[in-house]
């Protein structure tokens, strides 16, 4: 187990009726805030009115920035920084999904650095030197990314067709409100995407080396079992409070750092491949992962078998998560890989090709970009140019 420093600075309010604590939490940090949200859903579900009333009743001055898109873009980050500076705002309240929260984190980073966010994306080493970010709090209306309890975010630049992740040690939300009832209005395809995103995060952390990694691996297996137990009910029954709760908390804890304890970095090749896909096609992140992840694992497994490497990760998921009883290790690993694919396919209702979504992905340039940018290196295995083309071909 590697040396680890672990701290989670986010205070979590989980469950119904917690918004009564919202004003108290905000006022610990500021009474001049930027309120960020997405296109329309928080207005439809009545959450916008509820939040605005709380702010007004508690004399918290706020300026609004709505219209943050899924796969959020640099333009709304720039607008946010402008508003923060113009109105001397000292806190961001993000209400919505991962896109709203990620954009808000990037506003805080760009504002503190006094540099354009895309300049920072291209000069990554400068980000660590930045400090004094204004604080961020969130109210989540979708379960997927785990952004509510981590310090990362993803942004898209439509001018360059790039989608990149930027994190900062001060970008953890100071609080996050998770009310499973806010998920009731989520459309089914977003529920599917959220479950797939969560499972993919667990897999990315799991496949971090060719050894069993004790604590973190057992933790991840437990979350996988829980997601498998509740996913189908969550996808089909919007109003099932228990399923909404279990998936919501699992999504948060899949990517809040606990899965990483004692590990090096996780294997983020599937996410790298998906970010190219959504940068170019605006495809939904979690759905893209569900198509790509089984192909990546299949590529890894074939190489492991060819190179006579340890299959312990596949074997442990097979035994501990899918409860497979197969004596031969190679056979067990192959069956596990198949079970993972069947699981994603089941959630996707077998729509496991881009053509099922009428999406055409011209991936030639992306393959070159991934290789040129050096994104091919995964913690578990590297992917060659040829591997990537094949994976993209498989999901077309
Ligand atoms: O824009 P609005 O009107 O809010 O509608 C949203 C949006 O269309 C809708 N929605 C949200 N809550 C709803 C609702 N519709 C009905 N009822 C509700 N209660 O759902 C749509 C998707 O929202 P979005 O915020 O884009 O989804 P998600 O949370 O999945 O975020 C995806 C983004 O996060 C990035 C992804 O790449 C993508 O850009 N990621 C961020 C990560 C992180 N910060 O750690 C890690 C992830 O791996 C991921 O890359
Ligand atoms: Zn993800």
Image (cartoon, rainbow, N blue to C red):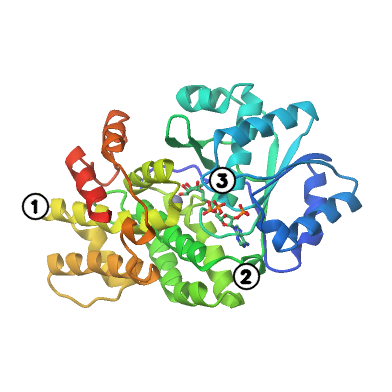
Position of 234 relative to 297 (above/below)? below
Label 2: element kind: loop
Residue located 47% across and 57% down the image: 254
User: Horizontally, is 344 left or right of 380 in the view?
Assistant: right
Question: Circle 3 is placed at which residue position?
Answer: 7
Position of 344 relative to 211 (above/below)? below
Question: Circle 2 is placed at which residue position?
Answer: 184
Mark 3, Cα crowd under 10 Å, few <14 / some 14-19 / many 20+, is few
Picture quarter containing residue 178? bottom right
Label 3: element kind: loop
Q: Residue 302 in the image: state x and y as whole percent.
A: 14, 55
In this view, the residue in front, 389 or 62, is 389
Position of 321 relative to 302 (above/below)? below
Find the distance from the CA under tag 1 to the CA under tag 3: 40 Å
Label 2 near ligand 1 (CB < 8 Å):
yes
Mark before the other along the chain sequence, 1 or 3: 3
Nearer the viewer's eye, disc 3 or disc 2? 2
Numbered badge on residue 306: 1
């Amino acid at each position: 187990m590697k040396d680890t420093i672990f701290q989670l600075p986010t205070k979590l309010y989980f469950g119904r009726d917690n918004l009564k604590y919202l004003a108290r939490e905000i006022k610990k940090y500021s009474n001049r805030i930027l309120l960020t949200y997405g296109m329309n859903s928080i207005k439809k579900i009545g959450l916008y009115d509820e939040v605005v009333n709380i702010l007004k009743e508690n004399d918290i001055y706020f300026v609004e920035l709505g219209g943050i898109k899924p796969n959020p873009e640099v333009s709304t980050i720039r607008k946010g920084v402008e508003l923060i500076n113009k109105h001397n705002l000292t806190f961001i309240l993000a209400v919505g999904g991962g896109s709203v929260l990620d954009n808000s984190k990037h506003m805080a980073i760009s504002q503190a650095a006094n540099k354009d966010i895309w300049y920072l994306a291209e000069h990554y080493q400068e980000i660590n030197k930045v400090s004094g970010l204004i604080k961020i709090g969130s109210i989540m209306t979708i379960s997927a990314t785990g952004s509510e309890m981590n310090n990362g975010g993803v942004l898209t630049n439509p001018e360059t067709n790039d989608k990149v992740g930027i994190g900062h040690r001060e970008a953890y939300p100071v609080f996050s409100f998770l009310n499973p009832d806010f998920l009731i209005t989520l459309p089914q395809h977003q529920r599917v995407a959220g479950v797939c995103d969560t499972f993919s995060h667990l897999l990315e952390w799991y496949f971090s080396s060719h050894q069993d990694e004790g604590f973190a691996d057992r933790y991840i297996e437990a979350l996988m079992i829980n997601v498998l137990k509740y996913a189908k009910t969550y996808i089909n029954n919007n109003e099932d409070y228990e399923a909404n709760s279990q998936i919501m908390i699992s999504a948060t804890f899949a990517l809040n750092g606990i899965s990483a304890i004692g590990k090096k970095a996780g294997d983020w090749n599937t996410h790298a491949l998906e970010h190219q896909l959504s940068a170019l096609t605006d495809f939904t992140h979690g759905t893209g992962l569900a198509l790509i992840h089984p192909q990546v694992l299949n590529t890894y497994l074939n190489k492991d078998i060819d190179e006579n490497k340890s299959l312990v990760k596949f074997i442990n998921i097979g035994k501990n998560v899918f409860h497979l009883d197969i004596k031969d290790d190679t056979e067990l690993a192959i069956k596990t890989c198949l079970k993972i694919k069947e699981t994603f396919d089941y959630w996707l209702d077998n729509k496991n090709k881009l053509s099922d979504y009428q999406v055409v992905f011209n991936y030639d340039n992306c393959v070159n970009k991934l290789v040129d940018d050096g994104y091919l290196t995964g913690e578990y295995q590297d992917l060659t140019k040829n591997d990537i083309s094949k994976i993209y071909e498989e999901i077309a």
